[in-house]
Amino acid sequence: MTTHTAGASTRHPGLNLGEPHEEAHSANEELVFGFWVFMMSDFIIFGLLFATYVTMLGGTAGGPGPSDLLEMKGAFIETMLLLASSFTFGMASLSLKYHQGTAKLIGWLVVTLLLGLGFLAHELKDFHTMISEGGYPSRSGYLSAFFSLVPLHGLHVAGACLWMLAIFGQMAVHRIDTQVKTGLTRLAILWHFLDIVWIVIFSLVYLGGLT
Amino acid sequence: MTDESSFLLGRLGWDALPFWDMIQNPTRESIINGIIASGAAGMVVLGALAAAALITWYGKWKVLWCDWLTSVDHKKIGIMFIVIALLMLLRAVIEAAFMRAQQAFGLGGGFLSPEHYGQLFTTHGTIMIFFMAMPFLTGLINFVMPLQIGARDLSFPVLNSVSFGLTAAGAALMMISLVLAPFSTGGWTGYPPFTELQANPGPGVDYWIWGVTLSTLSSTFSGINFAVTIYKKRAPGMTLMRMPLFCWTALCTSILMIFGMPPLTVATGLLALDRYLDFHMFTADLGGNMMNYINLFWAFGHPEVYILILPAFGVFSEVFSTFSGKRLYGYTALVIATMAIAVLSFTVWLHHFFTMGQSAHINAVFGIATMLIGIPTGVKIFDWMLTMYRGRVRLTVPMVYAVGFLILFSIGGLSGIILATPSIDYQIHNSLFLVAHFHNMLIPGLLFGMLAGYTYWFSKAFGFQLDARWGYRAAWSWIVGFMLAFFPLYALGLLGMPRRTVAFFDPVYLPWTIAAGLGALIILYAIVCLMAQLWVSIKRRDALATPGGDPWDGRSLEWDTPSPVPEYNFPVLPQVNSHDAFYRQKCDGAPHESPARYEPITIPKNTAMGVIIGVSGTAVGFGLTWHMWWLALAFSAVALVAMIARGFARNTTWTLDAEAIERQQRAWAHQLEQFEPITRQWEQSEANRGVPVPPNEGAIQ
Amino acid sequence: MRAHESNAQDTQTLDQNTDQNTQAQQRGHDDEDLARERQRDFRSYGWGLFLSLVLTLIPFGVAAFVPLPSIAHWIIIGECAVVQIIVHFRFFLHISFSRNTREDLQLILFTVLIITILAGGTLWILFDLYYRMMPGMAP
Ligand code: HEM
Ligand SMILES: [Cu+2]
């Protein structure tokens, strides 16, 4: 299966590091595939929460509904932050793949991390506003559904940020060795995956609820 | 529950002890129930103490830690899974016997309180599904599948150990709940609003939620691990269509685990949010919708029953083929049927709540989809029968289970078709007819399959066979006991007796409940036989030893190894050229080919990750159940730190040098020459050293 | 789009020198292949960003500024979301129809099938139940 053109030796989803990183590249074949399967399992969780959310739209129990609480501006800013972070993570992956130097790799990763944290901060602020306006989860079935879906995504983002910090730690101790590379490859997949989930959130929850 | 909750102990108080109620307000009922519950708790405590004392006495703590708990070897983890399964089987069968006894004396009251009976069917159901069946099949797949595909381990050995830790944690919570009671009374399905805070503020439902959640996480990880292993780790030449059927069923079960467990995670997760953070997902008021829980639960529940049954189908396929001395009939049809079942099982979940009130056309669609599953299942039954047809069938112990399965499972399947008709289901829903049906699938299907697999592969794990005489006794008692215990329930169901009833007032039921009670006694005897079998076999392990590794004249690659199997499984990865790979080697006259040169083998090092996650899982679950927030937080932190620290670990493998491997293999080859090969006639006798006569001299197929 | 492409070009020339020493280690690799691959990778992310931006701006813009009946809004939003998801899979996660990644594609399609069955079934069942028993829950 090993061919000599680098592009042909795609072994797994996400960016393949290719032959210059032979060890990480072949370790990734199983690791990333396994992680990918895990992501698919996670997709089912989100899929069911989305369906549940739709079925709970009517359960406002006289409390505030989507059009009373949700805000287009906040969702837009969060969307942009997350999209930008997906792109910057892509740049980080490329600097890893093409040996563009540790500084550049870490630079892109730090930018990504900041964008992710920015997303979280903004989302928390949104939740805070919602809650202070009477949109807290125990108010109604609808709000419970909202708060079991959107913060779960946020929790995933927080987990991904933590993972990135852990990888920074590994870099400090072990430099950019095979495990760091495979870790980054999987983290990249998680990051892009979370962006995909967010597409559904902003479309269904925010835009769908506001129009 | 105490009213005020303290920082240290949360809401845990003296009243959690099983005899507290009996002392506080002694009535006849509370005393009887208190004694039974305290007896159970006493057995847990004494059992744990006795185990610890024995380990100390024999000085085995180090062995336990180094060779088992921290091991990442798929064979050891598989065995530990099965140990949990057998222990939990014992507990759940005893509980079942109490329930049957209650109903045998239940006319007008019986001896158990409704509360106690409710806990019994809840723990029985929960344990049988999540802590008996799931660990059993996970353990078997763990042990057998890598050997059958010619791999050295699973793709993610450490994750495997973590999976084990999580299951063990859930099982530990179940056992702790006997001592620090009570458990939930909401049934294994835990439907709200009964399980919501308003109706059930106590810790019971929380025990259930966390026990089940730990098991769910474990199964999701196991599923991923198995699927990736089958995709990526097959030996050279082992194409998918050359895999033994057990591996196919393992693959389909893993896919069902990956996609079927998430709905349960969602259901129990949302229920937990309702209970802990005052959400209103499933509450009766404020816009909650309890019907969605039922929907989500069964979106998991139906794939789950196929998770349970498919590996058993795999075991039976191996057993029928081996003990008929024939290649499996209709291999391709069986593969297609397995996959069809896996996909179809996602399209039928509504048949568990036909009576919830949706329109007739929806019921019809799901009813028809349900009946469709009968088709691939029927295909399988015929394939197994045709495998035996014109074979030289040997009625060994696994084969007795298999033949019992074939007949009884067909009966259960037919009662399933009856239940799949919505109009009939309206009559017998929630009656004992249903209980009879699903036990008819689960005992002859799942449980016989697991026990057949346990008997079939035992010698591979430990190097000696299980005693056949006690094996026959157990198998026949299971078959007879099952029939006597559950066929009466069909009648009771049709007579209108509801499930989950503690007592009844219609004397018409009595003869049937007494018959079922006798059946339960025979099942208890079967359990005793299984224990006696294990005891006797261990005593006679030298006489029953099969170090040759191939006691049944086997066909697939696991029999190509010595028993017990060395840590690295295969000195060199086998080259596979056909279906029934090992049998083919034997036919060609060259089993156990030894290579010209041995290579060193890299093996993953032991790790405490599984133990750490297991202990943290137990502590977090326990803390959340009793509202000891500090405990839950502290151990969540421990688990998190452990996972991060694991990321820093390097040098996680060691290398076994080629000379050591060569020495071991030479010694084995030398041993093989000394043993007298036996014909199939003697395979269950002490003459069996694990070396069959070559195919062209022995029984011709 | 032009902007992104030239951007990628820039980065590439910039790094030509830093790559020099690592290239020595690359077995069986000629520079041209690598350069071409790098260009393709960069372009992939560039396209991904560009298309996603467009597909985000359209639904937000339409929802905020263009008065249309709700149903038209939902169709536009839904379609943009589906296309954007495909864009992310294609350009950020590099899933394609090429032979090597077929397994992943099959896995995604299977997941989509299961989600469709489970989520679609959930909606079908629950809205039917609302219609018959809890009209208040139907939005
Ligand atoms: C070994 C012999 C067994 C006996 C005598 C037995 C007996 C019983 C009884 C008496 C009940 C309560 C019926 C009622 O609702 O009134 C029950 C429920 C149940 N059993 Fe068994 N059982 C056995 C084995 C199994 C096995 C092997 C499984 C699964 C692997 C199983 C799974 C269940 C489940 C899921 C329930 C429903 C619990 C609930 O209502 O929530 N049982 N069984
Ligand atoms: Cu079902």
Image (cartoon, coloured by chain):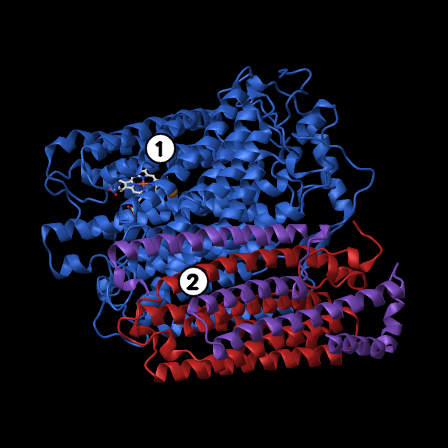
The colour one sees for chain C in the rendered image is purple
Whether residue B378 can be seen here: yes
| Quarter holding residue B488 | top left
- The answer to whether marks 2 and 1 sit on the same chain is no
Depth check: B358 or B641 in front?
Answer: B358
The span from disc 2 to disc 1 (Cα, nearest Å) is 32 Å
Amino acid type, mark 2: Leu
Chain that bears disc 1: B
Relative placement, left or right, of B45 versus A109 is: left
User: What number of labels is visible?
Assistant: 2
Residue at the (41%, 78%) spot, across then down: A70
Residue at the (64%, 35%) spot, across then down: B241
B51 in relation to A150, above or below = above
User: Mark on residue A49?
Assistant: 2
Whether residue A151 can be seen here: no
Residue position for label 1: B417
